[in-house]
């Protein structure tokens, strides 16, 4: 698995993209901020950050990113959606007032927006994420969504103590309800880097 010269983009339309860029740089990835469809071609993978999914999806349509990204994903292009980014990748969104909000429908998950309550109900917790090793992973949840249902192809990576699913993978797609870019722990970014390296040249 060659990790040299991997180019990973971070969707930079709205939300916490700068923090993702900083961690990717720290682990030695060639990082690009992505705003336009033409920029997708040079990439080996993409992170869709947390923020406001309604805004991100609207801007993706406005900038002409929605259709080309959806097509690339269907060919095996690796994408990791964190928080709002996870909502954008889902097959279906629950708890969305805006009926016009159509997600990419790329991953076989149903997500519930703002599932833990309002902004004040944000929280931090140590999670067990076996694919990252034995050491607990400190996760920051900000007005987070949860994964209500997963399809048969989806691998559940982490659950809260009450059984609620908060991280999952389906082949080239990775999602997390929380914000791994807001902690100093680089293991989740390295896990995605490995997915990107293993998919390189496959699509
Ligand atoms: N509440 C936001 C949404 O529904 C997600 C919050 C986040 O990304 N931290 O899009």
Image (spheres, grey):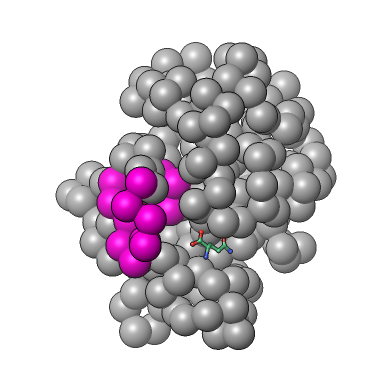
Residue 74 picture quarter: top left
- Left or right, 172 with respect to 139, comes to left
Residue 91 lies in magenta, yes or no?
yes
Residue 200 shows up from this direction: yes
**At 32% across and 78% down in the image, what residue appears?**
163
Judge whether residue 130 can be spotted in this image. no
Answer above or below: position of 76 versus 183. above
Question: For residue 106, what is the image quadrant?
Answer: top left
- The answer to which quarter of the image holds residue 145 is bottom left
* 140 is higher (above) or lower (below) than 79: below
- Of the 4 image quadrants, the one containing the N terminus is top right
- In this picture, which residue range is highlighted in magenta? 87-100
Q: Where is residue 113 in the image (x, y as percent from the top left)?
A: 41, 65
Q: In front: 191, or 10?
A: 10
Give the number of callouts: 0
Q: Which residue is depicted at the point 37% across and 62% down? A: 97
Residue 32 picture location, percent across and down: 73, 29
Which residue shows up at 41% across the image and 35% down it? 172
Residue at 77% over, 47% down: 18
Residue 191 colored in magenta in the image: no
Q: Nearer the viewer, residue 4 or 102?
A: 102
Percent x, y of residue 112: 35, 65
Quadrant of image for the C terminus:
top left
Q: Where is residue 149 in the image (x, y as percent from the top left)?
A: 24, 61
């Amino acid at each position: 698995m060659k990790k040299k010269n991997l180019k990973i983009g971070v969707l930079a339309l709205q939300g916490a993209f700068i923090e993702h860029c900083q961690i990717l740089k720290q682990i030695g990835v060639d990082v690009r901020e992505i705003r336009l469809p033409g920029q997708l071609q040079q990439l080996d993978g993409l992170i869709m950050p947390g923020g406001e999914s309604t805004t991100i999806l609207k801007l993706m349509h406005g900038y002409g990113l929605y259709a080309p990204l959806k097509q690339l994903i269907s060919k095996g292009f690796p994408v990791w959606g964190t928080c709002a980014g996870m909502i954008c990748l889902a097959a279906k969104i629950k708890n969305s007032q805006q009926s016009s909000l159509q997600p990419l429908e790329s991953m076989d998950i149903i997500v519930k927006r703002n599932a833990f309550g309002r902004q004040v109900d944000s929280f931090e917790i140590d999670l067990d994420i076996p694919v990252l090793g034995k050491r607990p992973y400190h996760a920051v949840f900000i007005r987070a969504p949860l994964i209500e249902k997963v399809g048969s192809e989806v691998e559940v990576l982490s659950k809260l103590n009450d059984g609620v699913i908060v991280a999952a993978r389906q082949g080239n797609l990775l999602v997390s309800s929380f914000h791994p870019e807001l902690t100093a722990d680089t293991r989740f970014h390295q896990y995605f880097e490995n997915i990107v390296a293993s998919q390189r040249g496959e699509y």
